[in-house]
Image: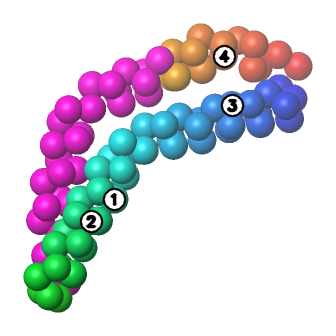
Amino acid sequence: MTVDVVMDIAREALFLIIKISLPVLLVSLAIGLIVSIFQTITSIQEQTLTFVPKLIGIFLALMLLGDWMMTQLVEYVDVLWGSFSMYIRR
């Protein structure tokens, strides 16, 4: 296995991590922004106010997108293990 192959595997894995985590992070960011604007408008400065809406939003995002996330991971692992014989050549 050459350094180029290892770098390709690492690059694909990092891209997959970013692609899978992006929807959940965007949901958390959007909810945090909305709650922040609400806190600014109403002058409520409670730090724990963002926790519950973010928790619910992330839970819902994982429920809705969990199947897609697992499909992406399984496809990556299938390709990785399917090419295993190519990786162990000298």
Q: Is residue 7 above or below residue 27?
A: above
Q: Mark 4 or mark 1, which has the lower sequence index?
A: 1
Quadrant location of the N terminus in the rendered image: top right
Quadrant location of the C terminus in the rendered image: top right
Disc nearest the viewer among 4 and 3: 3
Q: CA distance from mark 3 to mark 2?
A: 34 Å
Task: Please state which amino acid type lies under the numbered disc 1.
Answer: Leu
Residue 29: which numbered mark, if any?
Answer: 1
Of 73 and 60, which appears nearest the observer?
60
Q: CA distance from mark 1 to mark 3?
A: 29 Å
Task: Please state which amino acid type lies under the numbered disc 4.
Answer: Phe
Residue 58 in magenta stretch: yes
Residues in magenta? 46-75
Number of numbered markers = 4
The answer to whether residue 48 is seen in the rendering is no
**Given contact means CB atoms under 8 Å apart, are the residues at marks 3 and 2 in contact?**
no
**Residue behind mark 4:** 84
**Residue behind mark 2:** 32
Task: Please state which amino acid type lies under the numbered disc 2.
Answer: Gly
Disc nearest the viewer among 2 and 4: 2
**Residue behind mark 3:** 9
